Amino acid sequence: MEITVKKIGAEQKEYIEIGCHKKDERINEIVRFIRSRRGILTGTKDNRRYSIALPDILYIEAVDEKTFIYLEKDCYESGRRLYEFEEVLSGRSFARISKSVIVNLMKIDSIRPSLNGRFSCLLRNGEQVIISRKYVPDIREKLRGGAI
Amino acid sequence: MKDHIKETLGIFFIAVTLIDAAMFILGMMLQPDMQFGYEAFVYPLIYGAIGCIPSLIFYTKKEMTFKQALVRDLLQMFMIAGLIVGVMFGSIKLTSDTLPQFIGVVISIVIIYILVNVIGWVFDMKTAVKMTEDLKKYQEKITEENA
């Protein structure tokens, strides 16, 4: 298989195109690999640095001066501030839901009113995170296809 | 704070409507022949405004737990009851004639407070259901785009 890498202008959207005779398991594997690399963040755990695929992230939380990336079973620390994550993830399926949390919208199972006057979202792993009222209009806009 | 004021304004209008209804019901039960001047139209607005004061006092940016929110809500309710009862009965001596009014007002305040919260919760529930629907559509769209 011949591999060609072509440089394109900054105004164009980056893309990967595969020319093949038949879409077989080998091609599917390449596609899966590319998808898995499509969004990567880095975090540390036990002084080791790890790459974290965006689809695996449940939410990112800032606690005091530290930022933590939560996955279903793991938690990684990051040196980045929450607002930096907000910028990096602005075009992705992530949304700021409170002063201290950015959530992966693809990992939310449902949203319900919380008895403390706010909303909470139930994540697919059963965890609940609070949505502040302040962020509700922006979240609704994003869910309806707005670019927030 | 701006959002909280907006929210409190919504609560104010719900409270005014409920106070109006409570005044009508209590009045019909306890003093059906009583007559009022135009000033009677202002009372629900005044009591509604008084009822909103504790919500502004107890406002906090902190994310509260359910227990903390419950304690805050109970304190707010007692404060509202104290303020309104103070304004209404502060200069009146409690007698066997005024005692039923006093009890009626206190019960009304508790019912109105609970109703305001229940109505607020019903509105929030509607918002949450709509958001969950939008969320499901969004997730389907993104999943299709990635397929």
Image (cartoon, helix red, strand yellow):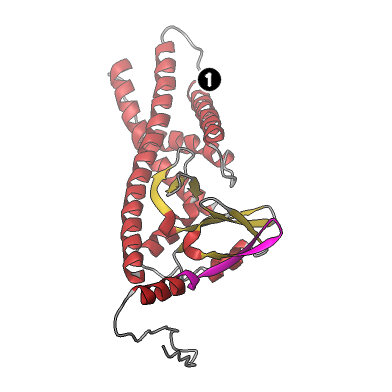
> Is residue B42 visible to us here?
no
- Residue B56 lies left or right of residue A136; in this view the side is right
Q: What residue type is labelled 1?
A: Ser
* Rendered position, A56 above or below B97: below
Q: Position of residue B63 (x, y in %)?
A: 57, 44
* Rendered position, B110 above or below B102: below
Q: Position of residue A38 (x, y in %)?
A: 48, 73
Q: Does the magenta stretch include residue A44?
A: yes
Tell me which residue sits at (49%, 60%) in the image. A56
Q: Give the range drawn in magenta.
A: A36-50
- Residue B46 lies left or right of residue B61; in this view the side is left
Question: Which quarter of the rendered picture does the C terminus of chain B lie within?
Answer: bottom left
Q: How many labels does the image show?
A: 1
Tell me which residue sits at (48%, 56%) in the image. A135
* Rendered position, A60 above or below A112: below
Q: Quadrant of residue B107?
A: top left
Q: Mark 1 points at which residue?
A: B91
Q: Where is residue A33 in the image (x, y as percent from the top left)?
A: 46, 72
Q: What element carries label 1?
A: loop
Tell me which residue sits at (41%, 72%) in the image. A29
- Residue A78 lies left or right of residue A38; in this view the side is right
Which SS does the magenta portion mostly show? strand
Classify 10 Å Cα crowding around label 1: few (below 14), some (14-19), many (20 and above). Answer: few
* Chain for numbered disc 1: B
- Residue reaching furthest top? B96
